[in-house]
Image: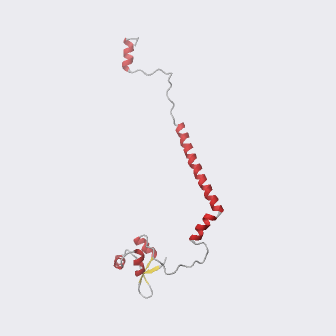
Amino acid sequence: MAWHSVKEACQMAQKSRRTLYRDMARGLLSYGVDDSDKRVIETSELIRAYGELAKVAQPESEKMAHVGTDDDTLKLAHTDPQIVALVAQVEQMNQQMVEMRSELQEYQRLLTHQPDPEPSSPPKRTFLQRLRYLFDPNA
């Protein structure tokens, strides 16, 4: 990560100069000292202390020493036929997994299904019904 002056750090963290110096004094924000005895703060330290940093415009665009910047990678990903085929294959496999899970749930439901009691067996009588039968066999 890069080292930044207090002024740059204020812009990136969107905090006042006073806040940064107060946090440095309390030990909440670590800093270093450059050759001219000025305080400098590392980017990762700003992120640790204050979270996501603001996008600060850079005066010049950075030159890349290699091909394959983010824009080139995105363009390549959409045009490379192997990648397109692999993405289609993954989507197809995901669809098959969804179908298999639903089949599995159906099989589990069928396996755990309890059959209905047999209708041929006479219904069980309550105590009062049995008592009534003893005294009146026609009931």
Looking at this view, is 85 or 17 the one in front? 85
Q: Compared with residue 138, is residue 88 higher up or lower down, i.e. above or below?
A: below
Relative depth, front residue between 110 and 58: 58
Q: Residue at x 65, y 62 (%)?
A: 81
Quadrant assignment, res 126 = top left
Image quarter hosting the C terminus: top left
Where is residue 38, by image quadrant?
Answer: bottom left
Instruction: Tally the numbered discs.
Output: 0
Q: How is the image coloured?
A: secondary structure
| Residue at position x 43%, y 88% in the image | 36
Q: Residue at x 42, y 74 (%)?
A: 46
Residue 91 lies, in percent from the top left, at: 59, 54
Q: Nearer the viewer, residue 84 or 6?
A: 84
**Residue drawn at (63%, 64%) of the image:** 79
Q: Residue 5 in the image: state x and y as whole percent.
A: 42, 82
Q: Nearer the viewer, residue 124 or 92?
A: 92
Q: Is residue 102 above or below residue 39?
A: above
Pick out the residue farthest to the bottom: 36
